[in-house]
Image (cartoon, grey):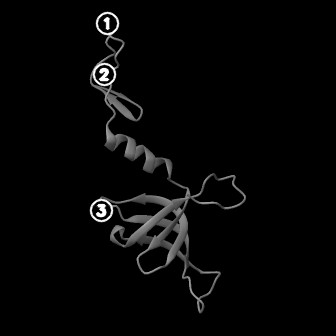
């Protein structure tokens, strides 16, 4: 078995039929997708309506999300629209409703997807 970046190969291309027998392992591609988000700014919406905006630094085996330099925002008429700094937070996966990443670090409009 050969490991090639985000995929693993159990064989080589078949020259008789021009068929590539490489198999993409979903766990490896998912892991590389999560790794590509490291140190990016994420916006995480939780079940009670709060929104956390911070730097993604990892997850654990239960998929809890760890953010650094985070701000917490509550939406509503009597809430502070500027949010509050909460620093380091661990957000339990069971509370996560939505995770968004900034389109590009150079994006000046602050768009998330």
Residue under label 2: 21
Relative horizontal placement of residue 109, taking residue 47 as reference (left or right): right
The mark found on residue 62 in the picture is: 3
Residue 8: horizontal and vertical position, in percent? 33, 30
Residue 46: horizontal and vertical position, in percent? 43, 74
Quadrant in the picture for the C terminus: bottom right
Q: Quadrant of residue 60?
A: bottom left
Q: Residue furthest right?
A: 108
Badge 1 density bin: few <14, some 14–19, many ≥20, Cα 10 Å: few
Q: Residue at image x 35%, y 41%?
A: 28
Residue 49: horizontal and vertical position, in percent? 47, 79
- First along the sequence among labels 1 and 2: 1
Q: CA distance from mark 1 to mark 3?
A: 45 Å
Which of discs 3 and 2 lies nearer the camera? The answer is 2
Q: CA distance from mark 1 to mark 2?
A: 12 Å
Q: Residue at image x 65%, y 53%?
A: 105
Decide: marks 3, 2 in contact (CB < 8 A)?
Answer: no
Q: Residue furthest front?
A: 17
Front position in the image: 26 or 18: 18
Q: Quadrant of residue 84?
A: bottom right
Q: Is residue 51 above or below residue 56?
A: below
Which of discs 1 and 3 lies nearer the camera? The answer is 1
Name the element at disc 2: loop
Q: Is residue 6 above or below residue 20?
A: below
- First along the sequence among labels 1 and 3: 1
Badge 3 density bin: few <14, some 14–19, many ≥20, Cα 10 Å: few
Name the element at disc 1: loop
Residue under label 1: 16
Q: CA distance from mark 3 to mark 2?
A: 33 Å
Residue 21: horizontal and vertical position, in percent? 30, 21
């Amino acid at each position: 078995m050969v490991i090639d970046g985000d995929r693993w190969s159990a064989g080589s291309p078949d020259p008789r039929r021009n068929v590539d027998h490489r198999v993409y392992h979903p766990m490896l591609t998912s892991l590389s997708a999560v790794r590509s988000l490291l140190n990016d700014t994420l916006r995480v919406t939780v079940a009670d309506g709060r929104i956390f905006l911070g730097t993604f630094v990892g997850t654990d085996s239960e998929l809890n999300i760890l953010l650094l330099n985070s701000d917490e925002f509550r939406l509503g008429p009597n809430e502070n629209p500027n949010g509050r700094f909460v620093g380091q937070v661990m957000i339990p996966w069971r509370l996560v409703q939505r995770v968004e990443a900034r389109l590009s670090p150079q994006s000046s409009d602050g768009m998330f997807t």
